Image (tube, coloured by chain):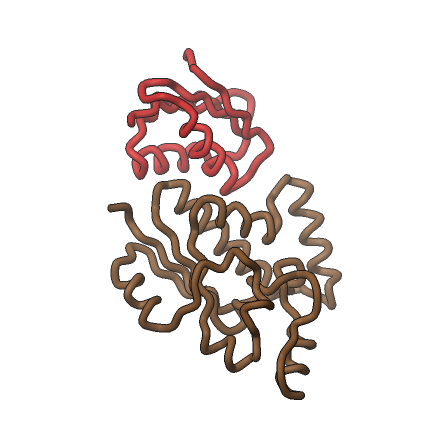
Amino acid sequence: MKADATLDCVGLYCPMPIYNTASKLKELKPGQVLEVLASDEAIKADAPAWCQATGNELLGIEEEGGEYKVYIKKSK
Amino acid sequence: MSEKVTLIMFSGDMDKALAAFNLAVGASSMGMEVSMFFTFWGLNLLKKNEGPIKSQGIMRKMLNFMNRGGSKRLPLSKFHMFGLGKWMMSRLMRDINSPSPQELLTLAHQSGVKFMACTTSMGIMGISKDALIPEVDSYAGVATYLAEAKEGKVNLFI
């Protein structure tokens, strides 16, 4: 999936991936896509929950070799 | 209007502080408005790490000596073992890049979490405003907390 920016959260645990995602997304424009790289499994549940709470769109989560790529589209 | 979260910080334990600050940072990252009300032992989280805590009278002096506080001095609620357990826990946390209580406190403050200190506890324990960190947003009592909690979606006593 193509992204406008990438955020590396590999090796970080809760609440850092969510905190960093929220901070990073502020730098993006509506419609742009952020790719979040993470190794903490919680991201699989937390990313959808965070997107639902904040009104951003979760485009997908890819899993490969214990690492996760999360794609979030900034909505507003 | 964004949803409100209120946390009563009653405990001065490091592990409970970690859980609470973690929640606070998480909630504010989710666009929620967070207030933390620090009372009793929880005031230890807001005490400055540097310098002595000056207070009046022998009993308050003794209390503030034995209960020095400060975000770097919080004991573990379990397996503290005169600091050995805490030292080990801090090392384990550093191993996985997990932030310390003081780092989480700073993150929480930077992300707009409001810190309120309970003036009754401050009075009982002889803790002056000078003894607390400048991140404290306001000094308040039960009505202020309840007015916020009434509007809160998530209210926790920690």
Q: Residue at x 34, y 33 (%)?
A: A51
x and y, in percent, of residue B139 in the image: 43, 67
x and y, in percent, of residue A13 in the image: 55, 39
x and y, in percent, of residue B123 in the image: 50, 80
In the figure, A49 relative to B73: above or below? above
Q: Residue at x 52, y 28 (%)?
A: A38
Q: Which chain is brown?
A: B
Quadrant of image for the N terminus of chain A: top left
Please give left or right for residue B133 compared with residue A19 in the image. right
Please state the total of marks drawn on the protein image: 0
In the figure, B97 relative to B53: above or below? above
Q: Which chain is red?
A: A
Q: Residue at x 41, y 65 (%)?
A: B157
Q: Residue at x 34, y 24 (%)?
A: A74
Please give left or right for residue A70 compared with residue A76 in the image. right
x and y, in percent, of residue A27 in the image: 43, 26
Question: Quick one: A9 or B31, which is closer to the camera?
Answer: B31
